[in-house]
Image (cartoon, rainbow, N blue to C red):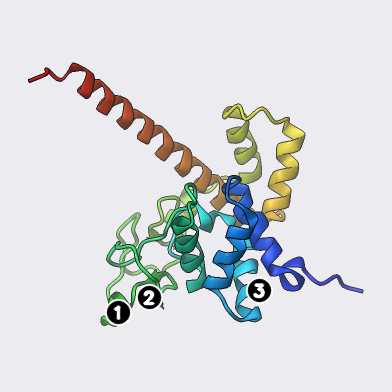
Amino acid sequence: MTAIPRAETDPNAVIVDLVAAVEPDLPPQTVQHAISQAVHAKPRVVLLARTLERDPGLLTSGRAEGPASVERLIRLLVQAGAVNVVRPPCSRCGRLGPLTNTNGSGLRTCASCGARRPDMQWACGGCGNSKTPRYGLDRSGREVCRSCYQAECTEDPAADLLNYLNGLALGLGESVLQEVIAEVTKGSSSITRRLLWDVQCVVANRILFERQQVIIWTEVRVRPRP
C-alpha cells in the first residue's frame, strides 16, 4: 500500500515545519494564521505545501516562482514579524506587491505587468543569444539557455553543497549535514543545485550587509562633529 504524502494529508504542518526551519523565533500559531490568510481552500494549501517542500529555497531566495500563494504567505509572514524570509519582487518591474500573474516563462509578475503585452523578443541572460530556447534560471535568477545553465553546473551538487556547509563551520557533523541534505532535496540533483546556489547567495548577501554596516559605522565615527 502506497503511503500518502504528508503534504497531502497535513499540508499545514508541512508548511509550518518548513517556515520554522528559516524562522525559528516565529510562533507556530502565527505561521498557521498566515497560512489561513494566504490560502483558503484545501487543494490550494496542498499545492503550497508541495511547492515549498519541493523547493524550500522559495522562502528565502526572492525568486518569483511557484503559485501566487507563495508570495502571499511570505508577505503575511513578514507582516507578522518574520526576518529571514524574502519577499519576491515582480519579475518584470522589480516592485514588491501581490504577484497575481505570470509571464511567458512562468515567472510571477504583478497585475500591472501582467496586463502588458508580453515581450516577444528574448535573449539568453548569459550569452545573449536570442535563437536558443529558454532552459532555466541560473544562480543569479537570469533566464538562460541550456548551454549557459549547464556551464554553471557541476557533476556532484550534493558533494559541493556538503563541502560548502562544512566551510561555514555550523558545528554540525558531516553525517548530520548529509542527512539534512538528503531530507530536503529528496535526492534531486536540480533541487540540490538550486539549494546550493540559494545558500551561497544568502551568505554572500549577509557578508555584503555586514561590510556595509562596518563602512557606515566607520564613517559615522570619523565624521567631524559640527
Quadrant of residue 156 within the rendered picture: top right
Circles 3 and 2, Cβ within 8 Å, touching? The answer is: no
Circles 1 and 2, Cβ within 8 Å, touching? The answer is: yes
The answer to whether residue 175 is left or right of residue 126 is right
Looking at the rendered structure, the kind of residue marked 3 is: Val
N-terminal-most mark, 1 or 2: 2
Graded by Cα atoms within 10 Å as few (under 14), some (14 to 19) or many (20 or more), the crowding at tag 3 reads: many
Rendered location of residue 69, percent (x, y): 51, 71
Figure quadrant of the N terminus = bottom right
Vertical comparison of 204 with 133: above or below: above
N-terminal-most mark, 3 or 1: 3
Quadrant of residue 17 within the rendered picture: bottom right
Q: Separation of disc 3 and disc 1 at Cα?
A: 30 Å
Q: Disc 1 designates what residue?
A: 118
- On the question of residue 156 being in view, the answer is no
Q: Mark 2 falls on what kind of element?
A: loop
Looking at the rendered structure, the kind of residue marked 2 is: Asn
Rendered location of residue 79, percent (x, y): 44, 58
Rendered location of residue 81, percent (x, y): 48, 52
Graded by Cα atoms within 10 Å as few (under 14), some (14 to 19) or many (20 or more), the crowding at tag 1 reads: few
User: Tag on residue 103?
Assistant: 2
Q: Which residue is drawn at 37% across and 75% down?
A: 103
Q: Separation of disc 1 and disc 2 at Cα?
A: 7 Å
Q: Residue at x 38, y 71 (%)?
A: 98
The answer to whether residue 142 is left or right of residue 154 is left
Q: Disc 3 designates what residue?
A: 46
Q: Mark 1 falls on what kind of element?
A: loop
Figure quadrant of the C terminus = top left
